[in-house]
Image: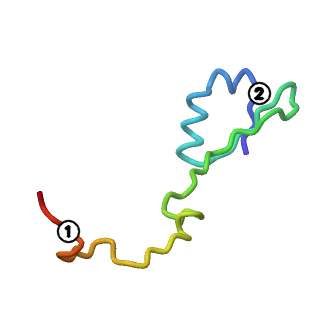
Amino acid sequence: MEKLNVHEAKTRLSAVLMEIEKTGKTFLICRNGKPVAEMIPYKRPSRLGYHPTLSKIDIAYDPVEELSEDEWGEVG
């Protein structure tokens, strides 16, 4: 973890953010030598996991099976 004073963090914000994105490094922002804030990489939630509510839905039929003649109904 690298320490930055408020002025340096403000001056180098774009460069600091780029370094966080590339390396995952964290920065401690200090005012008068005392910690004020911490800049850490944002961890995006995985979109590959199962949705807690939608994963409980159970489809009891094949949604892509073809319709029978009776299910088509009359045309026109």
65 displayed left or right of 51: left
Secondary structure of the residue carrying numbered label 1:
helix
Q: Residue at x 19, y 67 (%)?
A: 73
Q: Give the amino acid type for the residue marked by disc 2 in the picture.
A: Asn
Point out residue 64 in the picture as x, y percentages from the top left corner. Answer: 28, 72
Tell me the number on the disc at residue 72.
1
Q: Give the amino acid type for the residue marked by disc 1 in the picture.
A: Trp
- Quadrant for the N terminus in the image: top right
Query: Which of the 4 quarters of the picture holds residue 72?
Result: bottom left
Tell me the number on the disc at residue 52.
none
> Does 73 sit above or below residue 33?
below
40 displayed left or right of 56: right
Residue neighbourhood size for the residue with mark 2, other residues' Cα within 10 Å, grouped as few (<14), some (14–19), many (≥20): some
Secondary structure of the residue carrying numbered label 2:
strand
Which residue lies under the disc numbered 2?
5
Which badge, 1 or 2, comes first in the chain's sequence? 2
> Does 23 sit above or below residue 38?
below
Q: CA distance from mark 1 to mark 2?
A: 72 Å
Q: Residue at x 56, y 70 (%)?
A: 56
The residue nearer to you, when weighing 70 against 37, is 70
The residue nearer to you, when weighing 36 against 59, is 59
Q: Which is more foreground, mark 1 or mark 2?
A: 1
- Cβ–Cβ below 8 Å for labels 1 and 2? no
Point out residue 74 in the picture as x, y percentages from the top left corner. Answer: 15, 65
Point out residue 68 in the picture as x, y percentages from the top left corner. Answer: 20, 77
